[in-house]
Image (tube, rainbow, N blue to C red):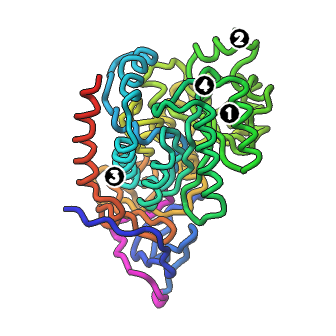
C-alpha cells in the first residue's frame, strides 16, 4: 500500500513527541524516554504537556540523525546491474557511455525520482550529486523534500546533450545565480569531472566561478592507479598535488574516492578544508585496487565523508551498507580491529545532519539490543533494519515505513518501463 505524495514546501512549527523510545545522537550515548524532535536538528526531553504536531509511540523505534551521502550519480539508477563483472574501463565503454549518448531529460527525471525514493526509504536525507541536467535533478530532489548539493558535470568533451564545456558552465552558473539566497534545501555546484576529463583552463574557470559565487566544487580524484600514473607522467605531480598547483581548491571542495593518495596530498586536502569522500563498495566492485586510507587521512586532519557513488557501480544507494563496508575494509586493510568502530563510523555517516530518522528495533536483525541498548548502534550498522520515519526540516517524508513525498510504487514502475526503452538503444 502506498500513500499519495504530499507537498514538502512547508515547515511544521511544532515538534513531534516520540514516547518510550531510544535515541542516539552524535555523542553515541543511548538515551531512553520521551523526546521532542524539533526542527533545525534539535531534540529535548518531553515533559508530556508541550504543543506537538503528533505523538508517536516509540517503543519499537530507535531515533538517530539521518545519513548523508556525499557522492552520488543518482539518475544512474537507470544503469543498475548493467555490465556486471566487467573491469572499470570496459564497463564504462561497453555499458555506460553508449547509453549516456541517448539519455534524455525525461529519463533523468524518472531515474532521479526513483533514486530519491531509495534514499528516503534507507534513511538518507542529503546527497551531493554529479550528473547531467542538474536543473531537473534539483527540481526532483526539491519536490521530494530532500537536501542536496547538485553539481553540474563539466568535461572537455560534449555532454549527453551535446553541450560543450562552455555551454555547461554557463548553464550551471545560471542555476547557481537563480538559487542564490533562496530557502530551497537544494543548492547547485560545479562538478569538474576529473583531471583527465578537464583541461587546466576548464578546472581554473570552474574554480573562479566557485570563488565568485560561493558554490561547491566537486571532483573525482585519485580513483584509480592509472589515473594517478597518467597524471604524474603528464605533469610530474599526482592529481591532488596538480590541482593544488593550479590553485583549483576552494573551501569545502568535495573530492570523491581518494583511493590512491600520498600523505603530502592528504595534508593539501586538510589545508583546503576539502571533503574526502570514501566510496568503498564502488571501489571494490570495480576492482580499483585501492581504497582511502582512513587512519592516514584522519592523522592528516582531513574531513572524511561517505558516499555510495552511483547505483550503476554500487547497485545500492543505502549509506548504511556503505558505512558497514567502510568500517570493515579499514579494519581489514590496516590489520586493526579498532579502526572505525561503530560510533566513529556513524559519526562520519551522519556528520552535519540536521534531520531525524527512526528505525525499527523490533526487527530480528536488531536483536539482542541489550539491557541498556548498548548493542543498538552496532546492530544498526552491521546488521541493519527497516527505516520507519524520515523527518526533514520538520516535514515527514516517510511515516510508519511508507514514503509520503514520493509514490514509491509509481516511481518503481516508471523506472522499469523507462529502462526497457533505454536499454533497447544499444
Q: CA distance from mark 4 to mark 1?
A: 31 Å
Which sits earlier in the primary sequence, circle 1 or circle 3?
A: 1
Q: CA distance from mark 3 to mark 4?
A: 43 Å
Residue 163 versus residue 136 in the image, above or below = above
Which sits earlier in the primary sequence, circle 2 or circle 4?
A: 4
Specify whether residue 26 is painted magenta: no
Residue 131 versus residue 199 in the image, above or below = below
Q: Nearer the viewer, mark 2 or mark 1?
A: 2
Residue of label 2: 234
Magenta segment boundaries in residue numbering: 48-67
At a point 48% along the width and 73% down the height, the residue shown is 10
- In the image, residue 178 lies at what x, y percent? 61, 57
Residue of label 1: 297
At a point 44% along the width and 70% down the height, the residue shown is 395
Dot 1 crowding, Cα within 10 Å, few <14, some 14–19, many 20+: many
Specify whether residue 66 is painted magenta: yes
Q: Secondary structure at mark 2?
A: helix
Which sits earlier in the primary sequence, circle 3 or circle 2?
A: 2
Amino acid at each position: 500500500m502506498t500513500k499519495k505524495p504530499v507537498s514538502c514546501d512547508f515547515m511544521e512549527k511544532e515538534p513531534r513527541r516520540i514516547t518510550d523510545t531510544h535515541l542516539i545522537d552524535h555523542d553515541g550515548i543511548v538515551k531512553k524516554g520521551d523526546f521532542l524532535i524539533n526542527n533545525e536538528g534539535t531534540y529535548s526531553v518531553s515533559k508530556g504537556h508541550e504543543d506537538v504536531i503528533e505523538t508517536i509511540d516509540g517503543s519499537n523505534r530507535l531515533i538517530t540523525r539521518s545519513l548523508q551521502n556525499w557522492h552520488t550519480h543518482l539518475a544512474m539508477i537507470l544503469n543498475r546491474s548493467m555490465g556486471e563483472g566487467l573491469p572499470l574501463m570496459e564497463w564504462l565503454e561497453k555499458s555506460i557511455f553508449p547509453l549516456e549518448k541517448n539519455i534524455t531529460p525525461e529519463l533523468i527525471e524518472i531515474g532521479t525520482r526513483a533514486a530519491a525514493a531509495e534514499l528516503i526509504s534507507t534513511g538518507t536525507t542529503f546527497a551531493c550529486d554529479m550528473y547531467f541536467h542538474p536543473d531537473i535533478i534539483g527540481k526532483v530532489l526539491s519536490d521530494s523534500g530532500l537536501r542536496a548539493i547538485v553539481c553540474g558535470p563539466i568535461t572537455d568533451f560534449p555532454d549527453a546533450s551535446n553541450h560543450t564545456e562552455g555551454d555547461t558552465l554557463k548553464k550551471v552558473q545560471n542555476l547557481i545565480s537563480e538559487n542564490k539566497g533562496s530557502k530551497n534545501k537544494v543548492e547547485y555546484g560545479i562538478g569538474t569531472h576529473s583531471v583527465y576529463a578537464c583541461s587546466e583552463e576548464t578546472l581554473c574557470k570552474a574554480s573562479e566561478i566557485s570563488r565568485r559565487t560561493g558554490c561547491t566544487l566537486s571532483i573525482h580524484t585519485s580513483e584509480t592507479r592509472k589515473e594517478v600514473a597518467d597524471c604524474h607522467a603528464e605533469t610530474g605531480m599526482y592529481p591532488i598535488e596538480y590541482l593544488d598547483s593550479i590553485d583549483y581548491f576552494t573551501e569545502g571542495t568535495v573530492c570523491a574516492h581518494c583511493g590512491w593518495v600520498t600523505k603530502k596530498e592528504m595534508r593539501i586536502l586538510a589545508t583546503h578544508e576539502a571533503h574526502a569522500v570514501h566510496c568503498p563498495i564502488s571501489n571494490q566492485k570495480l576492482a580499483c585496487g585501492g581504497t582511502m586510507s582512513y587512519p592516514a587521512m584522519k592523522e592528516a586532519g582531513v574531513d572524511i565523508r561517505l558516499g555510495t557513488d552511483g547505483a550503476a557501480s554500487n547497485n545500492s544507494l543505502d549509506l548504511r551498507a556503505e558505512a558497514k563496508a567502510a568500517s570493515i575494509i579499514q579494519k581489514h586493510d590496516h590489520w586493526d580491529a579498532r579502526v572505525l568502530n561503530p560510533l566513529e563510523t556513524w559519526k562520519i555517516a551522519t556528520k552535519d545532519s540536521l534531520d531525524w530518522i527512526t528505525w525499527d528495533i523490533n526487527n530480528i536483525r536488531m536483536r539482542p539490543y541489550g539491557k541498556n541498548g548498548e548493542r543498538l548502534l552496532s546492530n544498526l550498522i552491521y546488521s541493519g533494519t527497516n527505516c520507519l520515519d524520515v523527518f526533514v526540516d520538520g516535514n515527514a517524508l516517510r511515516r510508519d515505513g511508507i514514503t509520503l513525498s514520493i509514490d514509491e510504487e509509481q516511481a518503481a514502475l516508471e523506472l522499469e518501463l523507462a529502462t526497457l526503452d533505454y536499454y533497447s538503444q544499444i
